[in-house]
Image: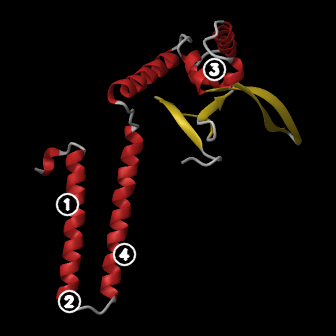
Amino acid sequence: MLNKKQSIIIYRDKRGNVELKADVKKETIWATQAQIAELFDVLPQAVIKHLKNIYKENELSKLATCSKMEQVRFEGDRKIKRSLDFYNLDAVIAVGYRVNSKKATQFRIWATKTLRDYIIKGVAINTERVKKLHERGIKDLRVKIEFIQNTIRKRELDRTETDSLLSVISDYANSWLLLKKYDDGDLSIL
């Protein structure tokens, strides 16, 4: 679960991450017109035009998708507070399907694939995140094995008992790693 200080990455373009404010309670993100314009590589006026049409055509409700939030900035020694309109994920997606730019096209390809995965498979998987979780799991397993090995060595157990226990732990860990490689499609282990 995300904490309030974390931002979530909803879309990654070819050059890097697009990070937007997360609202954990409402399970959405919030972006200003300027951030949406940057996301899709268009002028803010294009975003404003599309948002006006989205609300005019009742595609979305402005009350449900737009929120005024205070933003604090420092300009020199002065602390400036401004109230800005922030738009939620629904509005960002709606604009993304209307804007005409290369970045918007890449966004639509990503969004359509994600939606298709949900409809066809019942789930969309962030493979990059899963890979990182697997890598962290392997690293954690190795750390735990090392801890157990060190603990066993410190105890004054019979040498054959220690060797047998370490052998079982090693075999288990190696089996788990081989199964993981097989699940990842690495057929070189066969």
- Give the x, y percent position of residue 17: 53, 35
Please name whichever residue, 134 or 43, is drawn nearer the observer in this view of the structure: 134
Q: Give the CA distance from mark 2 to mark 3.
A: 67 Å
Q: Earlier in the sequence, mark 1 or mark 4?
A: 4
Q: Residue 126 — which label? A: none
Q: Give the CA distance from mark 1 to mark 2.
A: 24 Å
Residue pointed to by mark 3: 37
Q: Is residue 69 left or right of residue 160?
A: right
Residue pointed to by mark 4: 147
Q: Give the CA distance from mark 1 to mark 4.
A: 19 Å
Residue 36 sits in which quadrant? top right
Between disc 1 and disc 3, the foreground one is 1
Residue at 53% x, 36% y is 9
Between disc 3 and disc 4, the foreground one is 4
- The amino acid beneath tag 3 is Ala
Residue 63 sits in which quadrant? top right
- The amino acid beneath tag 4 is Phe
Q: Secondary structure at mark 4?
A: helix
Label 4: few (<14), some (14–19) or many (≥20) C-alpha neighbours in 10 Å:
few
- The amino acid beneath tag 1 is Ser
Residue pointed to by mark 2: 159
Residue pointed to by mark 1: 175
